[in-house]
Image (tube, rainbow, N blue to C red):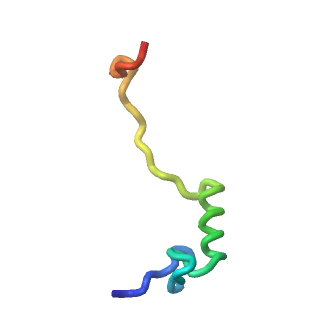
Amino acid sequence: MTAATCPICGKPTVQAYRPFCSRRCADVDLQRWLVGAYAVPAQDDESGPEDDPDAE
C-alpha cells in the first residue's frame, strides 16, 4: 500500500492534517472552497411546472 499524498502539494500526508501534509495546505484548500475555485457539479432540473405536484 502506498502512502497517501497531499492533494495540494503532493507531499506525504501527516495524520494530524489528513488528507493534507500541513496546516498551510489545509488552509489553501479551505481558501479555494471559500472563493469558489471548487464547485460541486449539479444537473439542471429540466422538469416544467406541470411536472411539479406541489405547484399551484
Quadrant of res 9: bottom right
Q: How many marks?
A: 0
Task: Give the residue at the far top of this rendering.
Answer: 56
Q: Residue at x 45, y 50 (%)?
A: 41
Q: Residue at x 36, y 27 (%)?
A: 47
Q: Nearer the viewer, residue 48 or 53?
A: 53
Task: Give the residue at the far front of this rendering.
Answer: 16
Q: Could you say where residue 14 lies in the image, as x and y percent from the top left?
A: 54, 83
**Vertical relation: 39 (above or below) 7:** above
Q: Could you say where residue 35 lies in the image, as x and y percent from the top left?
A: 65, 55
Q: Could you say where residue 23 lies in the image, as x and y percent from the top left?
A: 64, 76
**Vertical relation: 35 (above or below) 27:** above
11 left or right, relative to 55: right
Q: Residue at x 48, y 81 (%)?
A: 5
Q: Quadrant of the N terminus?
A: bottom left
Q: Residue at x 33, y 21 (%)?
A: 51
Q: Nearer the viewer, residue 47 or 56?
A: 56
25 left or right, relative to 40: right
Q: Quadrant of the C terminus?
A: top left
Q: Could you say where residue 38 lies in the image, as x and y percent from the top left?
A: 55, 57
Quadrant of res 43: top left
Q: Nearer the viewer, residue 19 or 46?
A: 19
